[in-house]
Image: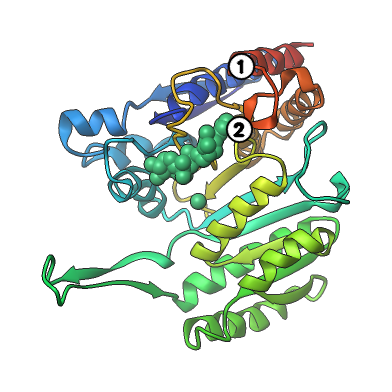
């Protein structure tokens, strides 16, 4: 019998709706696989906590999470609080505090889901985007001076370290190697950014020598957007800087049908700290509190979590259950052009787990 300690942090907006559904999924899997148990602790951090305490999570919040096996996260973002406060005060505090330097974003067109791409068959789009998640453009370095005066100045400094670049590229090459096509595309911008991005390219050449069986190429980030649309099947594993991958993965999610489906994992590959799994969407102010959110992004994130925990049988069963549900248009939520409510989708996935 293996018991996993899971922290669940619903956060804000639709995070508060989809994460409890995710907990139900894990409870259903527990019944199906009696040798596996999940021990939840829920944390009410986020916008409401901020209104009471002036911070998004307690100062010693990381200590509450440190001994967990994984974290299930909803979304940080509140209509009445500035986005940089909600993001840096909660989600990034956890990602950076636990050095979850590898962010993985699988992208596929699930059965029954329409892609906005013309002439694209589901098998043409099967990507794994690997995002550098600890430095680069989102290092947090920078500042403001002369605030409110005409000479006001502001900077956000992008930094890349050799260690940081090498570890994410090694991780990406290893993922590429583990996938059938053994193909990696390095996203860069070394034409315009002539220091860090040039080092980024150089380190890739060095790392590639240890992965002779992986076929790799390089693409400028702007050209990569066009390639994703025009030649999706030419891509497989993709590695990019923090900002580049942030943008490319929202595009990827839209090309695969909806932001509401896309999952992600913030991984500490060395397993010094718990890794965190979350749908890639945000708080979705426009639909929050209405039971309309698509919970599939959360459920797919749980698949990634189960893989990370080594529960491959359970992860496979859940992915099959998800695909069985997306295949049925009656169970599509509004973001997919359907009429179904979140609870309909959730109940259907739970039913599939038990059948
Ligand atoms: P968003 O993802 O919240 O919403 C974008 C659009 O997609 C909206 O129209 C929304 O209704 C739709 N959508 C998103 N998820 C959906 C789902 N599961 N089902 C159905 N429709 C869905 O992005 P935004 O509007 O740019 O951001 C809103 C807030 O969320 C902001 O405060 C932002 O900072 C925050 N945010 C947080 C995270 C995070 O915590 N990881 C990520 C993105 C945005
Ligand atoms: Mn993003």
- Which image quarter holds the C terminus? top right
Say which quarter of the image contains residue 314: top right
Q: Residue at x 59, y 19 (%)?
A: 342
Residue 76 tag number = none
Say left or right for 200 vs 348: left
Residue at image location 77% in from the left, 56% down from the top: 178
Q: Residue at x 70, y 54 (%)?
A: 128
Determine the secondary structure under disc 1.
loop
Q: Which mark is residue 341?
A: 1
275 w.r.t. 163: above or below: above
Query: Compared to 155, does 118 lie above or below?
Result: above
How many residues crowd mark 2 within 10 Å: few (<14), some (14–19), many (20+)?
many
Which residue is pictured at 50% across the width and 88% down the height?
194
Farthest front residue in view: 150
Expressed as whole percent of the image width and height from the top left, the position of residue 293 reads 55, 25
- Tell me the colour scheme of the image: rainbow
Which quadrant is the N terminus positioned in? top right
Q: Does residue 43 appear in the picture of this structure?
A: yes
Q: Give the spatial CA distance, label 2 vs label 1.
A: 20 Å
Relative horizontal placement of residue 159, taking residue 314 as reference (left or right): left
The percent coordinates of residue 171 (x first, y second) are 62, 62
Q: Which element type, helix, strand or loop, lies under badge 2? A: helix
Disc 2 Cβ-to-ligand 1 distance below 8 Å: no
Location of residue 216 in the rendering, given as x and y in whole percent from the top left corner: 76, 74
Q: Is residue 173 visible?
A: no
Image check: 208 left or right of 92? right
Q: Residues within 10 Å of mark 1 (few under 14, many from 20)?
A: some
Q: Which mark is residue 302?
A: 2
């Amino acid at each position: 019998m293996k018991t996993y300690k899971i922290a669940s942090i619903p956060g804000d907006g639709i995070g508060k709706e989809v994460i409890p559904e995710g907990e139900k999924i894990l409870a259903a899997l527990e019944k199906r696989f009696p040798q596996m148990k999940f021990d939840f602790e829920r944390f009410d951090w986020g916008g409401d906590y901020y209104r009471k305490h002036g911070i998004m999570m307690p100062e010693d919040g990381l200590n509450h999470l440190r001994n967990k096996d994984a974290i299930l996260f909803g979304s940080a973002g509140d209509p009445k609080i500035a986005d940089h406060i909600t993001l840096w005060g909660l989600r990034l505090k956890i990602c950076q505090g636990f050095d979850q330097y590898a962010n993985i974003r699988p992208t596929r067109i699930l059965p029954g889901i329409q892609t906005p791409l013309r002439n694209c068959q589901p098998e043409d789009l099967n990507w794994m985007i690997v995002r550098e998640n600890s430095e680069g453009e989102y290092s947090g370095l920078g500042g403001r001076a002369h605030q409110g005066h005409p000479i006001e100045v502001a900077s956000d400094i992008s930094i890349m370290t050799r260690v940081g670049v090498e570890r994410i590229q090694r991780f990406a090459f290893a993922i590429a190697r583990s996938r059938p096509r053994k193909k990696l595309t390095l996203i860069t911008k070394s034409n315009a950014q002539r220091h860090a991005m040039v080092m980024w390219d150089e380190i890739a050449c060095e790392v590639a020598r240890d992965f002779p069986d992986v076929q790799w190429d390089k693409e400028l980030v702007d050209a990569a957007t066009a390639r994703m649309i025009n030649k999706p099947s030419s891509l497989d594993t993709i590695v990019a800087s923090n900002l580049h991958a942030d943008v490319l993965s929202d595009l990827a999610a839209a090309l695969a049908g909806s932001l509401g489906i896309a999952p992600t994992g913030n991984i500490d590959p060395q397993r010094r700290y718990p890794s965190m799994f979350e749908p890639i969407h945000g708080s979705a102010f426009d639909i929050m509190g209405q039971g309309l959110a698509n919970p599939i992004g959360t459920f797919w994130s749980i698949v990634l979590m189960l893989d990370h925990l080594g529960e491959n049988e359970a992860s496979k069963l859940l992915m099959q259950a998800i695909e069985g549900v997306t295949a049925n248009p009656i169970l599509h939520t509004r973001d997919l052009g359907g009429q179904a409510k979140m609870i309909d989708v959730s109940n259907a996935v739970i039913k599939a787990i038990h059948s």
